[in-house]
């Protein structure tokens, strides 16, 4: 029995996805839990403002991302190194090689990316969102989001290649 | 479109989810006619699937969903017409209460005294029990923490009746009760009932 079945159903539907998004952004389990909780509490207080219930998932991800950015506003930001986009076409990695990498290592590589690149890349991998939806979720133009995903993906594959040289 | 251009475009291609996206159509056609590009594309999508599976394989800590639900805030409705209705209801309620108090003073009806009883049942963390119907051994650890941290405790008697457990006035008994959280115990105490709500002022706890 629940005092608020709508809230409970929403938590059950999305808390895993939000937690993974939060963990990929912060690299910290505790911070990911806090972000996930805070996101649902904001929804609980503002649910009446959400005009289109079909967009609740995008709204939750947008809110979590905003919370993350607010928390990081005063922290030192490290920019990642420039990416050589010309090397993109040579970058490839077998699924077997990636399979040998622990999820925690993958998270630590994501943590090395610039925040503006990390969030779209995580949504690209984790969620079945179109590029338009990713752009809308992060409030960034479509072209910018695609360019950031491409650059972030190249950087991630570079990091993976450095860890496990391809056959 | 050259192979290099197709490859750059397909760097973002994830698989069937992007099949309807027109930006990939031309490059996908190109990949069908170029075996080397086709092989690269297969490796790319397999790599995407593997990274996705790795990330989606991460599970949140146990109990996170329950914690979120348990601690959810009670939203305050911001509908002004409802706020006015609520204010009117409070005003009427206060007036009625004042009238009733006057009436009650006239009657001087005595309040029923406490009655000593013995109850056997499970020690409950009332917050989780009432809000989420959580009790029993699987909830023992949470109940222990909640009661120790000052959340109200109760006991569910074998006849299904639930009593709020308290100590002497001004004294908390939560530390002792936390040790028995979710366990079946026998408690001797003074029972008081007000407005249909039963309270048991604990005098003695016996573990079964």
Image (cartoon, coloured by chain):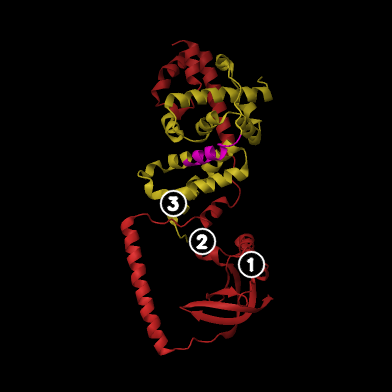
**Between B85 and A59, which is closer to the camera in this rendering?**
B85
Q: Residues within 10 Å of mark 3 (few under 14, many from 20)?
A: some
Magenta stretch in the rendered image: A63-75
Q: Are marks 1 and 2 in contact (CB under 8 Å)?
A: no
x 40%, y 81%: residue: B101
Marker disc for residue B181: 1
Residue A82 % position (x, y): 59, 20
In this rendering, which labeled residue sits more in front, label 1 or label 3?
Answer: 3
The residue to which callout 3 is attached is A45
The residue to which callout 2 is attached is B132
Per the rendering, the colour in which chain B appears is red
Per the rendering, the colour in which chain A appears is yellow
**Between A140 and A97, which is closer to the camera in this rendering?**
A140
Horizontal side of residue B27 vs A125, given as left or right: left
Sequence-wise first label, 1 or 2 = 2
Cα gap from disc 1 to disc 2, whole angstroms = 16 Å
Residue A80 % position (x, y): 60, 25
Residue B62 % position (x, y): 60, 50
């Amino acid at each position: 029995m629940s005092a608020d079945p709508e809230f409970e159903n929403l938590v059950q539907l999305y808390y895993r996805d939000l937690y993974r998004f939060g963990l990929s952004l912060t690299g910290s389990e505790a911070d990911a839990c806090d972000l996930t909780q805070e996101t649902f509490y904001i929804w609980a207080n503002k649910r009446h403002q959400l005009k289109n219930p079909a967009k609740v998932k995008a709204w939750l991800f947008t809110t979590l991302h905003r919370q993350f950015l607010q928390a990081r506003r005063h922290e030192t930001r490290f920019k990642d190194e420039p990416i050589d986009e010309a090397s993109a076409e040579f970058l490839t990695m077998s699924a077997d090689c990636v399979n040998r990498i622990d999820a925690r290592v993958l998270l630590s590589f994501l943590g090395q990316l610039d925040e503006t690149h990390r969030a779209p890349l995580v949504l690209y991998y984790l969620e079945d969102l179109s590029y338009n939806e990713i752009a809308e979720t992060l409030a960034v133009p479509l072209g910018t989001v695609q360019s950031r995903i491409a650059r972030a993906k190249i950087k991630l594959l570079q990091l993976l290649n450095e860890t496990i040289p391809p056959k | 479109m050259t192979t290099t251009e197709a490859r750059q475009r397909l760097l973002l291609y994830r698989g069937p989810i992007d099949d309807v996206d027109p930006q990939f159509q031309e490059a996908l056609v190109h990949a069908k006619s170029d075996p080397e590009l086709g092989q690269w594309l297969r490796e790319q999508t397999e790599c995407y699937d593997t990274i996705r599976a790795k990330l989606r394989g991460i599970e949140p800590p146990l109990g996170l969903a329950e914690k979120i639900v348990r601690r959810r805030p009670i939203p305050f409705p911001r509908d002004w017409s409802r706020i006015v209705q609520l204010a009117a209801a409070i005003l009427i309620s206060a007036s009625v209460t004042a009238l009733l108090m006057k009436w009650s003073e006239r009657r001087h009806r005595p309040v029923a005294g406490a009655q000593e009883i013995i109850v056997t049942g499970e020690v409950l963390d009332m917050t989780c029990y009432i809000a989420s119907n959580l009790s029993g051994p699987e909830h023992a650890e949470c109940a222990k923490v909640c009661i120790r941290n000052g959340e109200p405790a109760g006991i569910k008697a074998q006849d299904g009746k639930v009593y709020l457990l308290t100590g002497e006035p001004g004294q908390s008994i939560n530390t002792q009760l936390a040790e028995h959280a979710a366990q079946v115990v026998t408690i001797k105490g003074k029972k008081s009932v007000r407005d249909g709500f039963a309270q048991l002022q604990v005098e003695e706890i016996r573990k079964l």
